Image (cartoon, grey):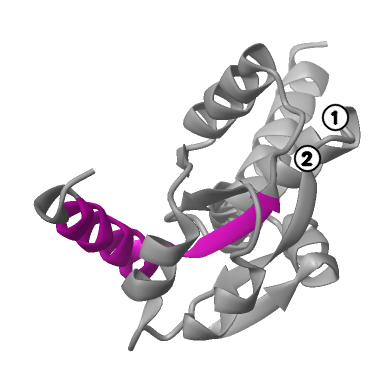
Amino acid sequence: MDRAQKEKVVEELGQIFESSGVVVVSHYAGLTVAEMQDLRARMRDAGGSVRVAKNRLAKIALEGKPCESMTAYLTGMTVLSYSEDPVAAAKVVVDFAKDNKKLEILGGAMGENALDADGVVAVSKMPSREELIASIVGCIGAPASNIAGAIGAPASNIAGILSTIEDKAAA
């Protein structure tokens, strides 16, 4: 890899570190190509990506970034998993690591906060962006449906009473 290619990789990694909600660093020694493709597919389905990069280039890309503290995890055969959603990449990596013991979670970063392996597991247990939006919409929509039901209830009660009076008058 020549200098221009290295500079391009450093720039791409810098963009990843700046724009991602979460970055998870893992050791992938011993994973087969099929297992790595499975991890990539799972991550793609969740809206994230997986990147294998030279640790030295990743450390250069981290210089001056808010998540610079995760450079300590960049040793050995590392793979970077990242997503814009602050939870998606962590969920996928933790689930994959449960199924495949060869993937060892080292840590990562969520914004400016460095995460150790336990921190990544804790982040993975948080609700995703979509789950949070659904719960907020449910909270907002519930009072409105209750109000609509309360407003409509007297009208249906009056209609029932009128129907009963009409039935009695006809009999």
Residue ID at (74%, 12%): 170
Question: Is residue 125 toward the left or the right of residue 152 in the image?
Answer: right
Q: Which residue is mark 2?
A: 103
Percent x, y of residue 117: 80, 65
Q: Amino acid at mark 1?
A: Asn
Q: Quadrant of residue 124?
A: bottom right
Residue ID at (62%, 24%): 36
Residue ID at (63%, 19%): 38
Q: Main secondary structure of the magenta part?
A: helix
Mark 2 and mark 1 residues within 8 Å of each other at the beta carbon: yes
Q: Is residue 16 magenta?
A: yes
Q: Which stretch is magenta?
A: 6-26
Q: Is residue 153 above or below residue 144?
A: above
Mark yes or no: residue 136 visible. yes
| Dot 2: element | loop
Q: Amino acid at mark 2?
A: Leu
Q: How crowded is the residue under tag 2: few (<14 C-alpha within 10 Å), some, or many (20+)?
A: many
Q: Which residue is mark 1?
A: 100
Q: Quadrant of residue 100?
A: top right
How far apart, in angstroms, are the residues tagged by discs 2 and 1?
6 Å
